[in-house]
Amino acid sequence: NFGSCPAPQIQFGKGLPGRNPKELAFAATDLTAFPHDAALNIAVITDATCLDLINRCGLKNDSDGVQVCRRAEAAAAKATKGGAQADAFNAVIGFTTNFAAVKA
């Protein structure tokens, strides 16, 4: 349960909002629920996403949804840099993605 928001998911690729079109970056897939420009560092996006669950989606810090998001954030931090980090976050949330295949 992610409150009034859909389950968070992170994408990785070029041409994401707020970045140079040729730059590889991370962003939430649903920018309406999780409005943050793309970032080069996934930690910027994962932290903003987990905070949005509290500030925008109506969850409490100790709710299951926020705790799952924080576990996903930790998994992303431990993954190989690049698209695999988005894949690791998404896997904990319950999505299968293959952003690790995205190359520069």
Image: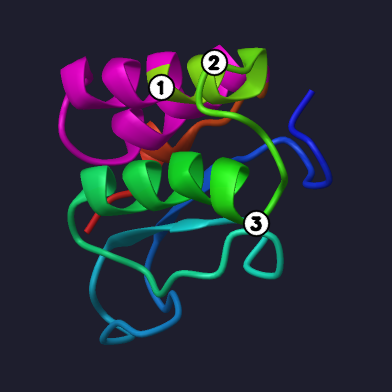
Q: Residue at x 30, y 82 (%)?
A: 19
In space, the residues marked 1 and 2 are separated at their CA atoms by 5 Å
* Location of residue 94 with respect to 61 vertically, above or below: above
Residue at numbered disc 1: 70
Instruction: Based on the picture, tell me whether residue 85 belongs to the magenta stretch.
Output: yes
Residue at numbered disc 2: 68
Q: Residues within 10 Å of mark 1 (few under 14, many from 20)?
A: some
Earlier in the chain: of badge 1 and badge 3, it is 3
Q: Element at badge 2?
A: helix
* Location of residue 31 with respect to 63 vertically, above or below: below
In space, the residues marked 2 and 3 are separated at their CA atoms by 17 Å
Numbered disc in front, either 1 or 3 = 3
Q: Element at badge 3?
A: loop
Earlier in the chain: of badge 2 and badge 3, it is 3
Dot 3 amino acid type: Arg
Check whether the beta carbons of the residues at disc 2 and disc 3 lie within 8 A of each other.
no
Q: Residue at x 57, y 30 (%)?
A: 97
Label number found at residue 56:
3
